Amino acid sequence: MKEKGKQGDQEKGGLAWWQLALLGVASTVGTGFFLGSAIGLKAAGPAFLAGLLLASFATYTVFEALAK
């Protein structure tokens, strides 16, 4: 159990250093993902979207199997 301090049940706001680091990594990966998608879409056209749909279905299937 948490001990009550002077502030009672209120928790300190803000982000920890590791949360900021992960936010930076996620931003970098997200940018690369969208740039990579644009390059793949330009090269393969609609087949790239079909591939993304297939990959998302496979990811969801694995997620459901692991969640049970």
Image: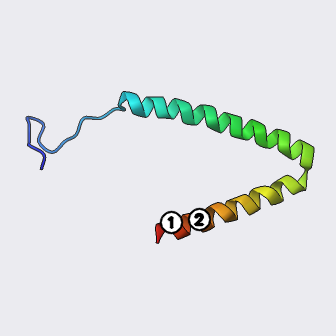
Where is residue 32? Give x, y as percent.
Answer: 70, 35
Element type at marker 1? helix
Tell me if 38 is positioned left or right of 27 in this view.
Answer: right
Residue bearing the label numbered 1: 66
Where is residue 9? Give x, y as percent.
Answer: 15, 45
Tell me if 43 is positioned left or right of 4 in this view.
Answer: right
Residue nearest the viewer, comparing 57 with 23: 57
Packing grade of label 1 (10 A; few <14, some 14-19, many >=20) is few
Reply above or below: 46 against 63.
Answer: above
**Residue type marked 2:** Val
Residue nearest the viewer, comparing 15 with 22: 22
Packing grade of label 2 (10 A; few <14, some 14-19, many >=20) is few
Q: Which residue is depicted at the point 62% across and 31% down?
A: 28
Q: Which residue is depicted at the point 55% across and 63% down?
A: 63
Where is residue 40? Give x, y as percent.
Answer: 84, 44
**Residue type marked 1:** Leu
Asked which colour scheme the image uses, the reply is: rainbow
Where is residue 47? Give x, y as percent.
Answer: 88, 56
Q: Which residue is depicted at the point 85% across and 46% down?
A: 41
Q: Which residue is depicted at the point 13% across and 46% down?
A: 2
Residue bearing the label numbered 2: 62
Reply above or below: 64 against 12.
Answer: below
Circles 2 and 1: CB distance less than 8 Å? yes
Tell me if 45 is positioned left or right of 65 in this view.
Answer: right
Element type at marker 2? helix
- CA separation in Å, label 2 and label 1: 6 Å
Q: Quadrant of residue 43?
A: top right
